[in-house]
Image: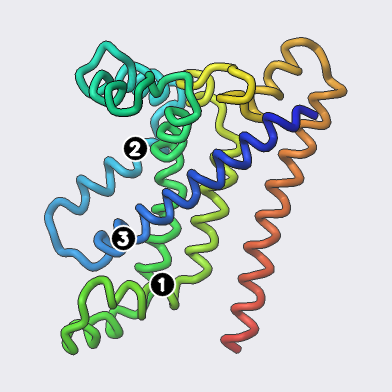
Amino acid sequence: MDWQAFFLTFRLASLTTLILLAATIPLAAWLTLSKSRLRPVIESVATLPLVLPPTVLGFFLLVLLGPRTAFGRVLISLVGHPLAFSFSGLLVGSVIYSLPFALQPLLAGFGAVDHALIEVARTLRASPARITLRILLPLARRSLLVAAVLSFLHTVGEFGVVLMLGGDIPGSTRTLSIVLYDQVENFDYAAARQTAGLLLLISLTALLLIHVFGQRKGADNA
């Protein structure tokens, strides 16, 4: 087992999940509460990574973050090094690629909240932030958990974006999915079974967490 890749993958998935939750909670709340005509456009852009091939997204990010674009050169001057083929660049790519997996469960959860409660809060002059914190999030706790778990698991298992944007640099961009690919390519099936088994165990444990939480919530509501 490549434990260096394991801890790097866990770090990448954890940071990605935290960043996505911080970004998608207010975004999902705005999409739920706002009546702006820009809602379909913003939601479509945020959902695009869901249908875009990972290698295509990885290629565009590789070009955008590289020294050949003005945006990439500005980032290099700020950070001090190219983001491509670094952990920081991998984190940026992971956040963008897993964005829909955090946003969609939150949109579904917020959308299921009784709209009458929101209207009453608006009548009482509650701000969108207060409505989000006091109404949407408490009533959509399971959606928040689903968003966190899906973001984490999707980052753990991502391959195309990692390969295109990060490559295979030990200790920097080599994740478990890259390790598994290398093991299979080298016909090291014994090691590949261990890596694949670990990824399977992580995924199964996380999904069980969702179902157990859902059952407890249902029992509490009953």
Distance from the alpha carbon under mark 3 to that under mark 1: 11 Å
Q: Which mark is residue 151?
A: none
Three-letter amino acid code at disc 2?
Leu
Q: Earlier in the sequence, mark 1 or mark 2?
A: 2
The reply to whether dot 3 and dot 1 touch (C-beta < 8 Å) is: no
Q: Earlier in the sequence, mark 2 or mark 3?
A: 3
Which residue occupies the foreground of this view, 175 or 171? 171
Three-letter amino acid code at disc 1?
Leu
> Of all residues shown, which one is farthest toward the left?
37
Label 2 crowd bin: few (<14), some (14–19), many (20+), radius 10 Å: some
State the quadrant of the C terminus: bottom right
Determine whether 194 is above or below 13 in the image: above
Tell me the quarter of the picture where residue 115 sits. Answer: bottom left
Q: Which residue is mark 1?
A: 137
Q: Which mark is residue 48?
A: 2
Distance from the alpha carbon under mark 2 to that under mark 3: 19 Å
Image coordinates of residue 129 in percent, x first then y, are 27, 71
- Closer to us: mark 1 or mark 2? 1
Q: Residue at x 69, y 35 (%)?
A: 6
Q: Residue at x 41, y 72 (%)?
A: 137
- Closer to us: mark 2 or mark 3? 3
Tell me the quarter of the picture where residue 83 sits. Answer: top left
Image coordinates of residue 65 in percent, x first then y, are 33, 22
Label 3 crowd bin: few (<14), some (14–19), many (20+), radius 10 Å: some
Which residue occupies the foreground of this view, 73 or 115? 73
Q: Which residue is mark 3?
A: 26
Distance from the alpha carbon under mark 1 to that under mark 2: 25 Å
Please indicate whether residue 154 sits to the left or right of residue 32 in the image: right
Three-letter amino acid code at disc 3?
Pro
Image coordinates of residue 140 in percent, x first then y, are 45, 71
Q: Residue at x 35, y 22 (%)?
A: 80
